[in-house]
Amino acid sequence: MTLMRLKMGKHKTILITGADGFIGSHLTEMLLRKGHKVRALAFYNSFNNWGWLEDVVQSENLEVISGDIRDPFFCTEITKNIDQIFHLAALIGIPYSYVAPDSYIDTNIKGTLNICNAARINDVERIIHTSTSEVYGTAKYVPIDEDHPLQPQSPYSASKIAADNMAMSYFNAFNLPLTIARPFNTYGPRQSARAVIPTIILQIANGAKEIKLGDLSPTRDFNYVIDTCQAFISILESKNTLGEVINIGSNTEISIKDTLQVIKDLMSSEVVFVEDKDRLRPKKSEVFRLWCDNKKINKLTGFKPKYDIKQGLLKTIEWFSVPDNLKYFKHNIYNK
């Protein structure tokens, strides 16, 4: 297949929802370095805190706005004079979805509806909607391609399946120029300590001798955040990706247990891992195997990840080992 790219010579004005978060802040930086103007949406709060955007070097090409994608009027307003959209804003915590599932309906499904409808009203030329590998559930076959059945094993994954379908309905019904990007497990600097990799690194960096964890047997396809962001941009720039669902992953599989051992070795730690029943998912809700088939993104865009697991973990450990970065995390508290 001939790889066709959109003409990006003219710098675009790009809206990023969820720009204050882990992946969104890195994507913001990457697009600014490419010379684009970025309208970065941070979640509205009384502290006027911009999340990880506080760490992003300010630029005349960066416009930070605070708001909430649950409001359709607000979404219509912020998508005016926008060329392209990366829609990343979402509630992503799986344990929290067990106790507050209605919040996931409002943010993940209705929020996606609001962004897609606003993009349609304002004639946005391109939108990338963010999915998650959690929609696949435990693999029925590996590696997992885009035709794999979707399995709602948590309220979170159910909300993302619905959000994906809502987004795709706008491509089918209204010709909204949309692509669904489906990243597998992303890690790196700024990731929430609720995720397994940063929580291990943080506790080791703070001198922990024993770390409580959930099930260590599941496998994941881990991807360094810079690779994930570059994949997003490659999808945006390709004319071959319109109306497609596209996995983002490394086509490798590693167990949580083996990942933790790599971290221990890289940090020269003798920490002991202990199973904590409070951190176990309900049996039918645990996703035991995720392994990405990334042939489609390579075929359509030419994208290939640059970081292997050790290279990415070294970068992540380096960032989390800077004392000034640790102040953002409560390493000794388990937040669901």
Image (cartoon, grey):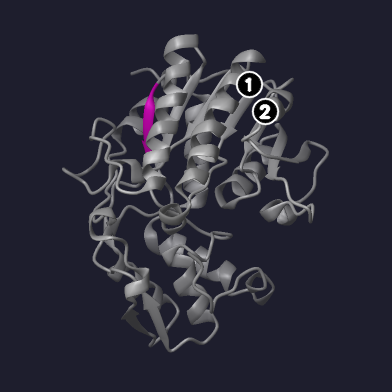
Label 2 element class: helix
From mark 1 to mark 2, how far is it between C-alphas?
6 Å
Label 1 element class: helix
Q: In this orientation, which residue lies closer to the viewer: 34 or 63? A: 63
Q: Amino acid at mark 1?
A: Ala
Q: Is residue 27 visible?
A: yes
| Quarter where residue 274 is shown | bottom left
Instruction: Name the chief secondary structure element in magenta.
Output: strand
Disc 1 + disc 2, Cβ < 8 Å: yes
Q: Is residue 123 visible?
A: no
Where residue 162 sits: x, y (%)? 40, 32
| 278 to 287, vertically: above or below | below
> Residue extending furthest top?
174
Q: Residues in magenta? A: 244-248
Q: Which residue is mark 2?
A: 75
Where residue 12 sits: x, y (%)? 68, 25
Q: Which residue is mark 1?
A: 118
Q: Quadrant of the N terminus?
A: top left
Mark 1 / mark 2, whichever is N-terminal: 2
| Quarter where residue 275 is shown | bottom left
Where residue 104 sits: x, y (%)? 49, 43
Q: Amino acid at mark 2?
A: Cys
Residue 127 painted magenta: no
Name the residue rendered at 62%, 22% in the picture.
8
Where residue 253 sits: x, y (%)? 26, 55
Q: In this orientation, which residue lies closer to the viewer: 4 or 135? A: 135
Q: Residues within 10 Å of mark 1 (few under 14, many from 20)?
A: many
Name the residue rendered at 64%, 14% in the picture.
121
